[in-house]
Image: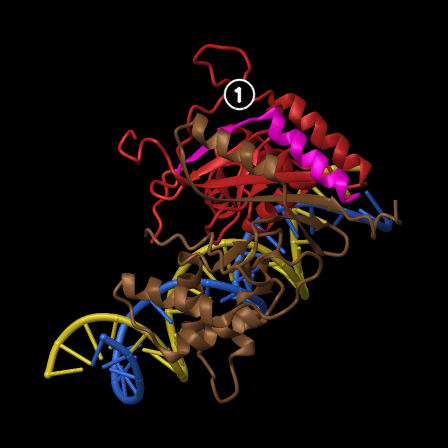
Chain colours: A red, B brown, C blue, D yellow
Amino acid sequence: MTARPHAHGEGRAAAAAGPAPPAAPTAAAWAVFVTFLKARCARVTTARKTVLVRVLARSDHFRADELVEDLAAGARRVSRGTVYRTLALLVAAGLVREIRDRDVHVHYESCFGRDHHEHLICDVCGRFIEFADADLERRIAVAAEAHRFQPRSHRVAIFGTCARCDGGR
Amino acid sequence: MTARPHAHGEGRAAAAAGPAPPAAPTAAAWAVFVTFLKARCARVTTARKTVLVRVLARSDHFRADELVEDLAAGARRVSRGTVYRTLALLVAAGLVREIRDRDVHVHYESCFGRDHHEHLICDVCGRFIEFADADLERRIAVAAEAHRFQPRSHRVAIFGTCARCDGGR
DNA sequence: ATTTGTGCAAACTTTTTGCACATCC
DNA sequence: GGATGTGCAAAAAGTTTGCACAAAT
């Protein structure tokens, strides 16, 4: 009862222009992950690499169970438990970001090499539209500061109706 | 879906600064809910009233299953299914707000007669600290506008360490 | 050789649902 | 009286976990 089209809006942040949504620099991300793993004396395994690669391959948001399904078959298959466990590691490593919308399940998105951004989530079509706003970030930092709160990360989600679903408006 | 009881003046206690733990004006909230229900040709029932009253009684955040437990026994008991169904109605009516943190379950908080606010969530103690920031709200409105997005609600959550857990900092 | 990770499948938790009966309009 | 809501219990859905085996250090 929830066929969500996880289409991405204009996506691509202010990087190189052109229609090339080139795969993120997998090697670099992997290097970061390896460093992270070594720092915690965790092992560098092929399953972990497989998960990371698959995550980077998905340019948009995805759910843990979608990834599980993705990796359930094939030569490089990875089991459910490992996918969940690895996803948690990737989040801890700062390579992946958790997004929680109104849905029951958690959504993830790779955030390696991407600028920080927030989301506009359409009530009607479920689409996620990304946006970045330096002033907004600044206000958030100020708010945390005002409460002597040491910010680690934050999330802004705006719900409503996107232009497309609002009859062009 | 046009009922937007967000700015119910209700003039009373709302203005008082400082910690205002007094029970929210139950009667007024109920009136809003009744109006909402009638507008959708839904029935006004005692179970729904019981849930609303219990929700208003909890000044803090709470989880759906906590409310279920709360209402599981007693003279005015309400069943699990009904609690979940009613909670959804209350959210739709704008009387209750959903909050999702890193936890698996959704948290709720009554927002009737309360000013809009956001949350600072401590990674260490799990505490929710509320704050309001007019500029932040403004930036959010601007961001939505820039994308011709019709905003209905929004949520800002900042994760990190609160002053108390950060050794007074 | 030892320690940590993985696959598997069962267990768990929270939320949703179908149905018969009760309640409201 | 007819439509809608409620209680109950069972089903779903998503995630976590224990354990035996495999892989990494």
In the foreground, B20 or A138: B20
Mark 1 neighbour density, 10 Å: few (under 14) some (14–19) many (20 or more): some
Magenta span: A127-148
Residue B164 relative to residue D21: left or right:
right
- Does residue B136 belong to the magenta stretch? no
Residue drawn at (35%, 50%), measured in percent from left and top? A2
Quadrant showing the N terminus of chain A: bottom left
Residue drawn at (42%, 27%), measured in percent from left and top? B147
Q: Where is B1 relative to A120, above or below?
A: below
Q: Where's residue B10, x and y in %? A: 49, 60
In the foreground, A149 or B102: A149
- Quickly name the residue at label 1: A13
Q: Where's residue B69, x and y in %? A: 55, 77
Q: Amino acid at mark 1?
A: Ala
In the foreground, B80 or B57: B57
Q: Where's residue A164, x and y in %? A: 31, 31
